[in-house]
Image: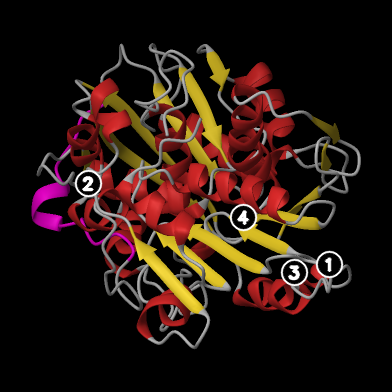
Amino acid sequence: MYDPLPSQKVFREDPARFKGFSGPIASGKSQALCHEAIKLSYVNAGRQGLIGAPTYPMLRDATQTTLFEILASNEIPYDYNKGENVLLMKDTGSRILFRPVDDFERLRGTNLAWFGLDELTYSPEQAWLRLEGRLRDPQATRLCGFAVWTPKGYDWVYQKFIADPVAGYSAVIAKAFENRFVLEKVPDFYERLRNSYDETLYQQEALGQYLSLQGGLVYSAFSRRDHVKELRINPNYPLLWALDFNVDPMSSVILQTEASKILVLDEIVIRHASTQEGCEEFEKRFPDHRGGVVVYGDASGNSLHTTGASDYQIVREYFRGHYGARVSYKVPKANPSVRERIQLTNGRLRSAAGDIKLLVDPKCKELIKDFEQVSYQADSNAIDKEKDRRRTHLSDALGYVLWQECRPQSAIGEHRERLI
């Protein structure tokens, strides 16, 4: 049974050929998308539609999970072919293709009666255009392309659906605090976000506002006055060593956590260096640290080199033979998104509530330069890595630790419940 929120209801009843749902976190975007897909599967009985997301993990972990839960809770019969990633609606004969849209050239081909994309602002415009060209099933009862998204500045989605829509395009902008289901379960949901996010991110992600982010500083919450302090190592606390594996430069940061704060104590930046040399420099600076060491870093370090050993294997072998202190590892199978790392870093630098939970020792000169100089490309939300190739490595390394240790656990679903 679908009891839509006010904005979801407007979106559901919108007759436009191409329609969008723009909303902040917890505005029910994925629910709106999946219910629209199910509705169109019934309207276009026996025809084929497509559900897409920016990447396969996002499609699998968020969009498909939501759809399967809705189908199960409403006792709608279906068959799912995992190998082909296709779902068959048993009572209508309709087929739903699931496709990531990062490789948009693969979207050419089969005619569609409808399609829906999750988190459109993180998808390339070419993917939308390819799907728009496939919306041509002559036997469809209702042709429709639709999408949901979180605002991400004045990007192509904003221009296409909101700023200058052509005939046949329409968009609903959901309001913050509209989701009564979330607030009934977690009354302090938005307050938690305010404490975790910086002000700009809070306005965009929690309030759903469109902000001018293009060409601006990535780490806008940083201030030398507030964040650069002389720090001391606590010999009883573990050192958290985070690596970004680059030959030029080999980059890493060393930090500790204390009273909910992140203290960045030092950095290691070596030009044209190997992973082995990075380990040697670490041991030189922090011999036999009593509190032990925890290694974090770039998931790409799991990949084998032509020598047959991965970067993390080299680190393990070195510490096994040279280092006296206890060493453990927190290495992800896949890297978090750039967006997640930036959010966490800015939120620690200064939350929307004004709390500062990240301090940097003045000896971390390259990391400070990252905070002050890393910017977005003009007319884009992508980080500019070409202006200075020495930039981003230290802030990336720091982001890997923050993602492992500081990312907020979802306030919704704490009891394995999915709220609308």
Mark 4: secondary structure: loop
Tell me, for residue 246, which label it has, or none: 4
Tell me, for residue 106, which label it has, or none: 1
Spatial separation of the CA atoms under disc 1 and disc 4 = 32 Å
Q: Mark 2 or 3 closer to N-term? A: 3
Q: Mark 1 or 2 closer to N-term? A: 1
Q: Mark 1 or 4 closer to N-term? A: 1
Q: Mark 3 or 4 closer to N-term? A: 3
The segment highlighted magenta reads 218-233
* Crowdedness near tag 3: few (<14), some (14–19) or many (≥20) residues, C-alpha within 10 Å: some
Spatial separation of the CA atoms under disc 3 and disc 4 = 29 Å
Q: Nearer the viewer, residue 259 or 289?
A: 259
Q: Position of residue 199 (x, y in %)?
A: 18, 53
* Crowdedness near tag 1: few (<14), some (14–19) or many (≥20) residues, C-alpha within 10 Å: few
Q: Position of residue 23 (x, y in %)?
A: 36, 55
Q: Nearer the viewer, residue 153 or 231?
A: 153
Labels 3 and 4 touching (C-beta < 8 A): no
Q: Amino acid at mark 2?
A: Leu
Q: Amino acid at mark 4?
A: Asn
Mark 1: secondary structure: helix
